[in-house]
Amino acid sequence: MPEVAEVAHVCALLRRNVLGYRISKVNLFNDPLLLPILKEAKDPEKELDRLRKSLTDATIESVGRHGKYFWLRLLSQKESKVLLMHFGMTGMVKLRNVKSHLIMMENGGDKKALKKLKTQSTKSKKKGRGG
C-alpha cells in the first residue's frame, strides 16, 4: 500500500511536471470502484460522458495533499474544479517520459537500486580521473 511519503513524492512530481498544462483527452471506463459516482448513476455511460466533458480542456492550476489523499485543482471556463484521488492498495501515478526516483520496495527493489547507484557512481569517478 502506498504510504504518505509515496503520495508526497507523487504530488511533488506532479507539481514539477503538470502545473499549467491543459487536459486534452480523458479516458474513463465504467468502473464503480474507481469512480464511486457510477454506483448510484441511473445512466453510468451518460455520467462518464459528463465527466469527460467536464475534465477536457481544463487547466491544472495546483496540486494538493492531505495525508494519503491528493488532488488536482482544475480551471475550466472560469470555473474551478477539484479532482480528488487516493491510491488505495496498489495505486501509483506514472508520467510518460518522466523518470521518478521513487523506488518500489518489492522484491528487493531498494537494494537493487542502491547497488545500481553505487555502480554508476564508481564508473563516473573512474571517468573523472581520466579512466
Image (spheres, rainbow, N blue to C red):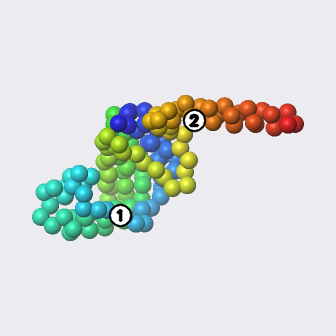
Residue 10, horizontal then vertical, whole percent: 45, 42
Which of the 4 image quarters holds residue 43? bottom left
* Mark 2, residue position: 113
Residue 27, horizontal then vertical, whole percent: 35, 64
Q: Where, quadrant-wise, is the C terminus in this rendering?
A: top right
Residue 54 can be seen in this image: no
Disc 1 is placed on an element classified as: loop
Residue 79 relative to residue 22: left or right: left
Residue 103 can be seen in this image: yes
- Under mark 2, the amino acid is Ala
- Under mark 1, the amino acid is Asn
Q: Which residue: 12% across, 64% down? A: 42
Between 65 and 125, which is closer to the camera in this rendering? 125
Residue 82, horizontal then vertical, whole percent: 31, 51
Q: Which residue: 23% across, 51% down? A: 33
Q: CA–CA distance between discs 2 and 1?
A: 33 Å
Q: Residues within 10 Å of mark 1 (few under 14, many from 20)?
A: few
Disc 2 is placed on an element classified as: helix
Residue 74 relative to residue 128: left or right: left
* Mark 1, residue position: 27
Between 30 and 48, which is closer to the camera in this rendering? 30
> Which labelled disc corresponds to residue 106?
none
- In the orientation shown, which residue stands out farthest toward the front? 107
The relative height of residue 83 versus residue 27 in the rendered view (above or below) is above
Q: Residues within 10 Å of mark 2 (few under 14, many from 20)?
A: some
Q: Which residue: 32% across, 59% down? A: 79
